[in-house]
Amino acid sequence: MINIFVKLNLNKISLIYKYTSLIFSALFLIFNIINYFTGNTNIQVSTIIIGLLITTTLVPLFFLFLLYIGWKTETLRLKKLFKTKPLDKLENFGFKTTLIDDDNKTVPTLQTKGIIINDFKILIGLISNDSKRISFKTFIEKTEISEEQYNKLQENKISFYETTISKIFDIKDIESMDEKQLLNALHEYISIIKMEKIIPA
């Protein structure tokens, strides 16, 4: 599975490694400079070299390892989710494998399933710290809505942010649907969005 992580996130891995290395190395050097000018003149060159080796190799690798564990956990959750009905039949109704967070430079890219309905691209996503619900996330043009519009969306279990909007489903409700019912629910979701004059990104 790690080869998929690297393939999807190669540029991000390089960027994150570089920045974590620079940040922790700079902090280490600043700490030692402060120590030196506050009277600790017993700092050894070998200590500096070892410290820099740690901050430029082990620390970034440990940070990337933590990112990989988080990515693997979410990937396994999605795979398990897509084995449950009706989500195991989504390809029959126009869903395709796609990427989520591909444009985010610091969040690892995940593979998920998505569909386009009336120009709105919908991606299936997980909700942090909530294993009983999933989101159908849609990217929209940056916009502001009234309190009345916001309350209407909330009543329909739709979460609004400036550039994204998500329909939240309880997994048990999803499992009680067949494929057509789920697709109808998504069409209804998009209809509500369009009635509020929200524009797809």
Image: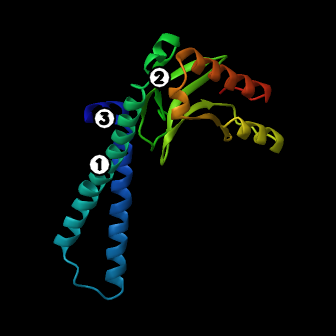
Marks 3 and 2, how far apart at CA: 27 Å
Q: Which mark is residue 38?
A: none
Taking the image as shown, residue 116 lies to the left or right of residue 8, namely: right
Q: Which mark is residue 87?
A: 2
Query: Which of the 4 quarters of the picture holds residue 136?
Result: top right
Marks 2 and 1, how far apart at CA: 30 Å
Give amino acid for label 3: Val
Q: Residue at x 63, y 18 (%)?
A: 184
Query: Which of the 4 quarters of the picture holds residue 39?
Result: bottom left
Give amino acid for label 2: Leu
Would you name the residue on which mark 3 appears? 6
| Number of residue marks | 3
Q: Residues within 10 Å of mark 3 (few under 14, many from 20)?
A: some
Taking the image as shown, residue 132 lies to the left or right of residue 68, namely: right
In the displayed structure, 61 sits above or below 27; it is: above
Could you tell which of marks 3 and 2 lies nearer the N-terminus? 3
Q: Residue at x 28, y 57 (%)?
A: 59
Pointer 3 with pointer 1, Cβ within 8 A: no
Would you name the residue on which mark 1 appears? 65
Residue 130, percent from left and from top: 49, 45
Give amino acid for label 1: Phe
| Quadrant in which the C terminus appears | top right
